[in-house]
Image (cartoon, grey):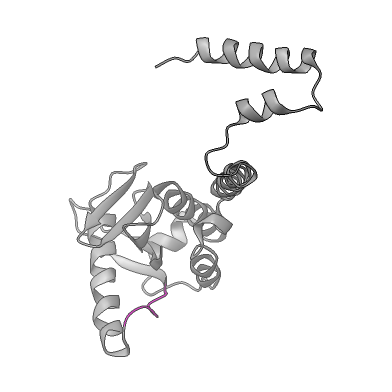
């Protein structure tokens, strides 16, 4: 899972074509490409980012797939789109969270007039921090992090139960053979098991 590029774009007005589309700030993480491929990959990603930024409706968040890449875009108003280009395995929820957070922070730092009048890129160094932080989606997104921890705990618990029981040994036979359980405990176990088995919904 990888975020290759983050771009903050001022899309041109599709009717008037003014002002022209401008990349206000961008950050890339292209270390997975060979040295000779990086220039071409970055150029392609900028083209991809500006293309989907221009074609996204105001207020819309979407993901657009192009071969092995997905461009996630959020266009908060007519003159501002934020695009994250990731691989296909990157979680959509985290990518949308990323473009939304970058949009909010950029809008706090720059007003609509600054964006509209810009003739060159704007200094927004925190973009590099975002692209670094979001390389691991489980660390960047709290919900995914908690889900991963729950999945890991569940896997450990399943493995532990399987490890306790020897091959072919069943919990039922262990309960029956146990001298440590009173008859009342054995009866409770069997009744609970019977009650649970009758309530399974298929």
Nearer the observer, 82 or 41: 41
Q: Is residue 84 above or below residue 29?
A: above
On the rendered structure, is 135 left or right of 190? Answer: left
| Residue 69: image location, x then y, percent | 27, 62
Q: Quadrant of residue 174?
A: top right
In the rendered structure, the answer to whether residue 20 lies left or right of residue 106 reads left
Look at the magenta stretch and give its main secondary structure: loop
Counting from the top left corner in percent of width and height, residue 110 is at: 52, 60
Which is more toward the observer, 192 or 170?
170
Viewer-nearest residue: 160 or 148: 160
Q: Quadrant of the C terminus?
A: top left
> In the drawing, does residue 87 fall left or right of residue 192?
left
Residue stretch in magenta: 28-33
Asked whether residue 19 is in view, the answer is: no
Instruction: Determine whether, in the image, residue 180 is placed left or right of residue 67.
Output: right
> Which residue sits at x=79%, y=12%?
184
Residue 34: x percent and y percent? Answer: 31, 86
**Image quarter (top left, top right, bottom left or bottom right) of the N terminus:** bottom left
Location of residue 98 with respect to 40 vertically, above or below: above
Is 135 or 25 nearer to us in this picture? 135
Residue farthest to the bottom, as pictured:
36
Whether residue 39 is visible here, answered yes or no, is yes
Residue 19 among magenta residues: no
Image quadrant in which you'd find residue 26: bottom left
The residue that appears at 29% across and 57% down in the rendered structure is 70
């Amino acid at each position: 899972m990888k975020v290759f590029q983050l771009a903050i774009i001022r899309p041109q007005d599709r009717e008037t074509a003014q002002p022209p589309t401008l990349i206000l700030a961008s950050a890339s993480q292209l270390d997975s490409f060979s040295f000779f491929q990086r220039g071409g990959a970055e150029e392609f990603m900028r083209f991809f980012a500006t293309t989907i930024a221009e074609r996204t409706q105001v207020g819309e968040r979407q993901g657009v797939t192009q071969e092995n890449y997905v461009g996630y875009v959020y266009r908060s108003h007519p003159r501002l789109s934020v695009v994250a280009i990731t691989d296909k395995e990157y979680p959509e929820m985290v990518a949308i969270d990323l473009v939304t957070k970058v949009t909010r922070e950029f809008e706090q730092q720059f007003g609509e007039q600054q964006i509209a009048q810009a003739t060159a890129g704007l200094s927004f160094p925190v973009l590099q921090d975002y692209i670094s932080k979001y390389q691991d989606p489980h660390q960047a997104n709290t919900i995914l992090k908690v889900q991963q921890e729950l999945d890991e705990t569940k896997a450990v618990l399943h493995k532990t139960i399987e490890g306790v029981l020897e091959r072919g040994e069943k919990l039922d036979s262990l309960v029956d053979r146990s001298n440590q359980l009173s008859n009342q405990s054995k009866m409770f176990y069997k009744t609970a098991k019977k009650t649970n088995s009758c309530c399974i919904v298929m």
